[in-house]
């Protein structure tokens, strides 16, 4: 979760977002009325969260800037929900110099050396303050620097990328030794964040159709970045949570926008104002976010939610091949799905892409699973009946030439001399088994069929023979 925020803006050297507390590392200002102030240490560093998160701000002249774009009537500092454009560079702290604390966060703020190559470099990143779009270190810098200023943030790993680090694109899909990293897990880092422009959440520009699409696309791109670089552990960890949150916010925004446009079309006067191109763009973004939402759940093996998200995408675009295929694949993998549901999902995909290799593969896999299921059912039925019946080609010792159940010994007779089958019916008797017997047998078969369908049906390995699902329109070259 994000750190607490107060919308009232204090000067950059006073931290309004931090809970007030008095510690040895955060002395009171002499002129304070009793409330604790954010501590300023040598070199202009400010303690935002003790020594685990520290920042210093350089003015526009110090970073060679011109004060940034005047995106909102000269607003110098952003507030809650405002949109801000950032240039971000991130370096891993490699070692310290002249630091008795061994270079760990908590020593001399300037007593460190950075790795030469940045693990992160991105220009023009758009985030909304307080929405959790990026890690806390970057978020805090954006809150407390002014337009055209640069904040240098030194933070412990828990305020950066924590135990997950940042994976390389294509650097391994698991959570073991096969993973390659741009930033190793549990690394302390330094971010340099320059705020170039602010669009106030209360401004006219913020609510225009064009900027709504820009904000939604930015969230989708940031979600792609979290999916690719921040996935951690079997369930995805913070990467999964951030990606889902971003895709949902972008999708909700575009869903609302699309519905608004459709309402405008019903009004004859407003229908002429509808921009068809923006409607198509918003609809494409919405379907992409729903597809990506499904991909995240597929990767985390939450197949029920993956199927639901793909079905939602199909509602907006019935011929979307990617959504149809994901719905079919999720139905195949979801233990709660029936073969009829899987068959219907694959049939819908075949109507759009009948020659597609993935559709054909899913159809073949479903056919194989149904065949295996029938074989299991048959084997279990035979087992419950005591094995396959055998017809004696010769007369047995009893001379009847009757059908004997497997494992029955005709020589074994009851005290009265009548030989009996394994089901307790005398061999020489013409009396059939009772209706109660067949009723109980049928009930047992039905119970077994239900068990096999729900719990014992063969499952397909999610990663067997298929690539890991990837978000739509993801560019491996882009950081955000």
Image (cartoon, grey):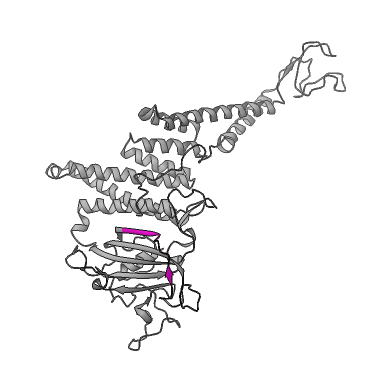
Q: Is residue 8 above or below residue 453?
A: below
Rendered-image quadrant of the N terminus = bottom left
Residue 111 drawn in magenta? yes
Q: Position of residue 178 (x, y in %)?
A: 53, 50
- Residue 203 quadrant: bottom left
Q: Residue at x 38, y 54 (%)?
A: 245
Q: What residue occupies the far front of the structure in this picture?
A: 116
Assign the magenta stretch its main secondary structure: loop
Please indicate, yes or no, whether residue 37 appears anywhere in the rendered image.
Answer: no
Residue 433 drawn in magenta? no
In front of the other: 195 or 342: 195
Q: Is residue 237 above or below residue 454?
A: below
Please indicate, yes or no, whether residue 213 appears anywhere in the rendered image.
Answer: yes
Residues shaded magenta? 110-122
- Residue 451 quadrant: top right
Rendered-image quadrant of the C terminus = bottom left
Q: Residue at x 62, y 33 (%)?
A: 448
Q: Position of residue 382 (x, y in %)?
A: 67, 25
């Amino acid at each position: 979760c994000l750190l607490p925020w107060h919308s009232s803006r204090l000067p950059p050297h006073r931290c309004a977002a931090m809970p007030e507390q008095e510690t040895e590392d955060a002395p009171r200002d002499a002129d304070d009325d009793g409330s604790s102030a954010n501590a300023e240490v040598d070199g202009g560093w400010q303690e935002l969260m003790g020594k685990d998160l520290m920042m210093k701000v350089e003015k526009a002249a110090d970073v060679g800037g011109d004060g940034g774009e005047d995106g909102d009537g000269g607003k110098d500092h952003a507030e809650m929900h405002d949109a801000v454009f950032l240039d971000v560079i991130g370096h891993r702290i490699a070692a310290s110099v002249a630091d008795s604390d061994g270079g760990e966060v908590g020593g001399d703020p300037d007593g460190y050396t950075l790795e030469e190559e940045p693990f992160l470099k991105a220009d023009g990143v758009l985030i909304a303050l307080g929405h959790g779009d990026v890690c806390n270190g970057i978020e805090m810098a954006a809150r407390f620097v002014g337009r055209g200023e640069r904040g240098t943030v030194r933070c412990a790993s828990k305020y950066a990328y924590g135990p997950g680090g940042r994976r390389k694109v294509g650097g391994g899909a698991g959570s073991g030794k096969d993973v390659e990293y741009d930033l190793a897990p549990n690394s302390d880092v330094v971010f340099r964040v320059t705020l170039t422009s602010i669009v106030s959440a209360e401004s006219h520009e913020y609510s225009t159709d064009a900027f709504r699409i820009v904000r939604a696309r930015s969230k989708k791109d940031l979600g792609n970045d979290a999916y690719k670089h921040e996935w951690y552990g079997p369930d995805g960890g913070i990467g999964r949570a951030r990606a889902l949150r971003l895709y949902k916010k972008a999708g909700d925004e575009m869903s609302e926008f699309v519905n608004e446009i459709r309402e405008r079309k019903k009004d004859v006067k407003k229908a002429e104002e509808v921009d068809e191109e923006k409607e198509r763009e918003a609809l494409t973004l919405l379907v992409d976010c729903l597809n990506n939402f499904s991909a995240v759940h597929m990767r985390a093996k939450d197949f029920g939610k993956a199927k639901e998200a793909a079905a939602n995408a199909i509602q907006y675009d019935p011929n979307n091949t990617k959504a149809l295929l994901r719905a079919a694949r999720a139905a195949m993998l979801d233990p709660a799905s029936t073969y009829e549901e899987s068959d219907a999902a694959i049939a819908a995909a075949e109507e759009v892409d009948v020659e597609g290799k993935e559709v054909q593969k899913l159809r073949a896999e479903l056919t194989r699973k149904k065949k295996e299921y029938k074989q299991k059912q048959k084997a279990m039925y035979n087992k419950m009946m005591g094995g396959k019946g055998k017809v004696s080609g010769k007369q047995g010792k009893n001379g009847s030439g009757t059908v004997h159940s497997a494992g029955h010994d005709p020589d074994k007779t009851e005290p009265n001399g009548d030989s009996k089958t394994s089901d307790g019916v005398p061999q020489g008797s013409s009396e059939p088994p009772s209706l109660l017997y067949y009723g109980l047998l049928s009930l047992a078969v039905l119970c077994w069929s239900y068990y096999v369908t729900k719990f014992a049906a063969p499952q397909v390995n999610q990663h067997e023979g298929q690539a890991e699902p990837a978000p739509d329109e993801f560019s491996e070259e882009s950081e955000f």
